[in-house]
Image (spheres, rainbow, N blue to C red):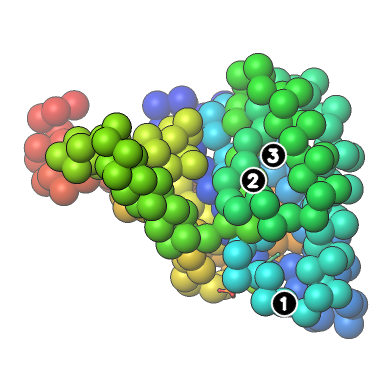
Amino acid sequence: MPIDPAVLPRHVAIIMDGNGRWAQDRGLPRIEGHRRGANAVSEVVRSARQIGVKALTLYAFSLQNWLRPPDEVTMLMRLLREYIIGERAEIVDNGIRLVTIGDLGRLPGLVRESLDDLVRDSAGNQAMTLCLALSYGGRESIVATTRALCEAVKQGTLSPGDITEESFQSAMQTAGLPQLDLLIRTSGEVRLSNFLLWESAYTELYFTDTRWPEFGRDEFMRALESYRGRERRFGRTREQLRRLG
Ligand code: IPE
Ligand code: IPE
Ligand code: MG
């Protein structure tokens, strides 16, 4: 049954955690978990688009993940390139616009190339925005934005008084995305791990023990169902909300 658009989050973000433990629980190498995790990504992207979510941001690789063993990082980069190439038709043909956030300069050239191609070729699509957080850190992105604004002040093109919550948001990499309504984390960890710190100020949070490779359409629907039952008060009282309708 279609969900009423009025109670559907416009922007959902997911911390796709638990690939390694999923594999290790089965006596498999961690990379096997990442491989299965890539299948889960395809299913959730398709579901989100079909349901009518306008933007989906996926935490695929954090700046801190560069600290992992070099073999795992290499395999993750290889999988990322395979995912981008393998999903190209699905993304382009279904009206999905791909964008990225993070320090992409640190990604290997081949990964960047395939990403740049797909970002360019899907730029006009409008059904849904898929935002991949790659080499991403929430604190680092706030610092980068602050530095850019300071630079503008130094150049004389911006006055400190013009820095507001809105203008700061406009200078962030997430500027083109709707307000973040719902943040999901899989695999039982209850933390943000440096994800979307600025953007999640008033976001609804949803945690599940399901490991990312086993997360699919049903679990995604459960998260949306949970969101539907939340009362988002933004500081006001319940009575005020009722009066405002
Ligand atoms: C998430 O799964 C994928 C990435 C961080 C790239 P993990 O690899 O963190 O899996 P666990 O947490 O070790 O189980
Ligand atoms: C967060 O997961 C990053 C991604 C899902 C890409 P981690 O597994 O790296 O997070 P921590 O280190 O356990 O907090
Ligand atoms: Mg993890």
Spot the residue most to the front: 155
Percent x, y of residue 204: 39, 51
With 194 as the anchor, is 162 left or right in this view? Answer: left
Q: Amino acid at mark 2?
A: Leu
- Indicate the quadrant containing the C terminus: top left, top right, bottom left or bottom right: top left
Is residue 135 visible in the rendered image? The answer is yes
Is residue 104 or residue 6 the one in the foreground? 104
Q: Residue at x 53, y 48 (%)?
A: 13
Quadrant of the image occupied by residue 115: top right
Vertical arrangement, residue 101 with respect to residue 30, above or below: above
Q: SS class of the residue under badge 1?
A: loop
Percent x, y of residue 5: 46, 25
Q: Is label 3 or label 2 in front?
A: 2
Q: SS class of the residue under badge 2?
A: strand
Q: Residue at x 60, y 65 (%)?
A: 63
Verify CB contact (< 8 Å) between mark 3 and mark 1: no
Q: Amino acid at mark 3?
A: Val
Q: Is label 3 or label 1 in front?
A: 1
Whether the residue carrying mark 1 lies under 8 Å from ligand 1 is answered with yes
Q: Which residue is mark 1?
A: 68
Vertical arrangement, residue 238 with respect to residue 108, above or below: above
| Residue 132, numbered circle | 2
Q: Amino acid at mark 1?
A: Arg
Q: SS class of the residue under badge 3?
A: helix
Percent x, y of residue 194: 48, 65
Badge 1: how crowded within 10 Å, few (<14), some, or many (20+)?
few
| Residue 176, numbered circle | none
Is residue 217 visible in the rendered image? The answer is no
| Residue 45, numbered circle | 3
Disc 3/disc 2 C-alpha distance (Å): 11 Å
Is residue 113 or residue 189 the one in the foreground? 113
